[in-house]
Image (cartoon, rainbow, N blue to C red):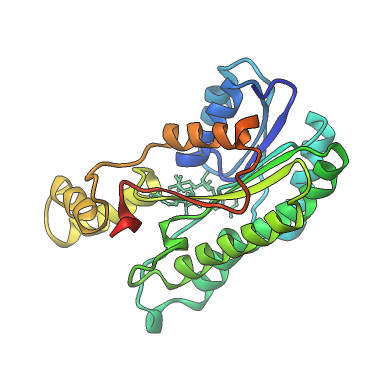
Amino acid sequence: TLDGKTALVTGSTSGIGLGIACKLAEAGADVMLNGFGDVDAAIARVSGYGTRVLHHPADVSDAAQIEEMVSQTRRDLGSLDVLINNAGIQHVAPVEQFPVARWDSIIAINLSSVFHTMRLALPGMRERNWGRIINISSVHGLVASAQKAAYVAAKHGVIGLTKTVALETATTGITCNALCPGWVLTPLVQEQIDNKAREHGDAARATRELLMEKQPSLDFVTPEELGELTLFLCSDAGRQVRGAAWNIDGGWVAQ
Ligand code: NAD
């Protein structure tokens, strides 16, 4: 159980981050949420498990706002024991047409933010000699797809960063791992389905084609399943899982 532990989940007002935040709260952790959109709905949902739930509006593309969020987590919840780096965005375009500003923001949000939260969270974890860092990479941290240059580069970077921190903490009670999901039906993926549907007709067909192209199970991974895997990595049994890039992808990278 995570009774008495505190967690910070970036990008947890929607999708995977919200699913993971719910599981952490269900297991007993106090949770600092982060992200944009329907903040009140997210707070209400995660609060349903009876632990303390707060929200910080940091834009994780900005190091100063991340510093503010990490100190506020420590100040208001008492510590930062479980760090889930989940905030992420996508942009789909061929590399020659990839908007430079989108490249910069994807590298900032999907990669550099992971460096900042970890460097800021580690000193407190070292003091207590306990910590769990779980970075939400992607199958795109292990293999590429066309037209996702910035996302693929950032997600590969997250896995390298995860391995480095795993080595730097190897003799401590802190573990650092990456999860590599395949398709999860969240707003981030719904947008890609909607774009496909606009090209050739209906949404059901677009969904089927999206899965058939990459995901052999022909079924989506769910935020709840990612939450369960997160709880395993947070448990005592997960103690020697270090520096892993753990795919949960319906068979995507087995091909
Ligand atoms: P989502 O769009 O549903 O949620 C993204 C969350 O990040 C939201 O809470 C949003 O408010 C927040 N966010 C976006 N920009 C932010 C910023 N600058 N600062 C702070 N918060 C910000 O997306 P999702 O599908 O749940 O994706 C979550 C993570 O999982 C991402 O890192 C994504 O790359 C990764 N992932 C998703 C899939 C998938 O199929 N959905 C697969 C593999 C990996």
Q: In which quadrant of the rendered image does the C terminus lie?
A: bottom left
Q: Quadrant of residue 222?
A: top left
Q: Is residue 155 left or right of residue 75?
A: left
Q: Residue at x 22, y 45 (%)?
A: 218
Q: Is residue 75 left or right of residue 81?
A: right
Q: Is residue 139 above or below residue 149?
A: above
Q: Is residue 234 or residue 24 the one in the foreground?
A: 234
Q: Is residue 165 above or below residue 146?
A: above
Q: Is residue 186 above or below residue 93?
A: above
Task: List the single residue furthest toward the top.
Answer: 50
Query: Where in the figure is residue 227, as x and y percent of width and height?
Result: 50, 34
Q: Is residue 58 left or right of residue 12?
A: right
Q: State how many labels appear.
A: 0
Query: Where in the figure is residue 112, as x and y percent of width and height?
Result: 65, 63
Query: Where in the figure is residue 138, as x and y percent of width and height?
Result: 45, 55
User: Is residue 65 among the parts visible in the rendering?
Assistant: no
Q: Residue at x 34, y 43 (%)?
A: 185
Q: Is residue 75 left or right of residue 157?
A: right
Q: Is residue 109 above or below residue 251?
A: below
User: Is residue 125 among the parts visible in the rendering?
Assistant: yes
Task: List the single residue furthest toward the bottom.
Answer: 96
Query: Where in the figure is residue 216, as x and y percent of width and height?
Result: 23, 50
Q: Residue at x 34, y 49 (%)?
A: 183
Q: In which quadrant of the rendered image does the N terminus lie?
A: top right
Q: Residue at x 63, y 59 (%)?
A: 163
